[in-house]
Amino acid sequence: MIQYNSITNILNQLYKYSNTFLHIRNDITLPIPAFSTIEKDIYGRLVPTIIINMTLIPNDDNVLAHIISHEWGHHASKHLLPIQEDAREFVEHAHHIQQKENEADLFAAKFITDFKYNISPIIEFFKSHPVDIKNRIHILTHLTI
């Protein structure tokens, strides 16, 4: 399991990098490593949130940094603007979804490069998960060369 200090360090770096504060919570029932959403707090205010499932993330700061920074990129790029105040699901055309994923990947790749994380374990992680591997590896390797 990843150490609390690692997560705190990555979150502090992301805050410094983007000047954006996000709520992060762990949910071991989430079927994917991480997900970005907008939730309501106890007062009904909308709160940008990243939900992570730490049991699906390897014990590697590089991979954790990429996963969280990718989701952070969705928020920093304003991808999760609710259609209605209580909206949590968004219906979009496939090309818009892919464009948003590419933008979040680019945000993550720049963050990983600026903070000098190692891309090798990130690429290995992608190879073992069903994502658009070629696109993500291309973005990572071209920014860090």
Image: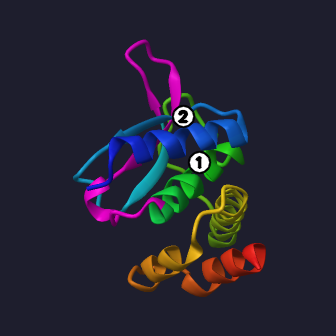
The vertical placement of 1 against 21, above or below, is: below
How far separated are the C-alphas under marks 2 and 1?
Answer: 8 Å
Q: Is residue 22 magenta?
A: no
The vertical placement of 35 against 63, above or below, is: above
Magenta highlight range: 39-61
Q: Nearer the viewer, residue 88 or 63?
A: 63
The vertical placement of 120 against 38, above or below, is: below
Residue at 37% x, 16% y is 42
Q: Which mark is residue 72?
A: 1
Q: Nearer the viewer, residue 124 or 6?
A: 6
Residue at 55% x, 83% y is 133
Q: Does residue 92 appear to the left or right of 46 in the view shown? A: right
Residue 78 location (% of width, % of height):
69, 44
Residue under circle 2? 22
Residue at 51% x, 73% y is 122
Q: Does residue 43 appear to the left or right of 58 in the view shown? A: right
Q: Quadrant of the C terminus?
A: bottom right
Q: Is residue 60 magenta?
A: yes
Q: Nearer the viewer, residue 53 or 66?
A: 66
Residue at 51% x, 53% y is 68
Badge 2 vs badge 1, beta-carbon distance below 8 Å: yes
Q: Amino acid at mark 2?
A: Leu
- Secondary-structure class at tag 1: helix
First along the sequence among labels 2 and 1 = 2
Residue 91 location (% of width, % of height):
56, 56
Residue 93 location (% of width, % of height):
64, 66
Q: Quadrant of residue 115?
A: bottom right
Q: How is colour applied across the structure in the image? A: rainbow
**Disc 2 residue crowd, few under 14, some 14–19, many 20+, Cα 10 Å:** some
**Disc 1 residue crowd, few under 14, some 14–19, many 20+, Cα 10 Å:** many
Q: Amino acid at mark 1?
A: Trp
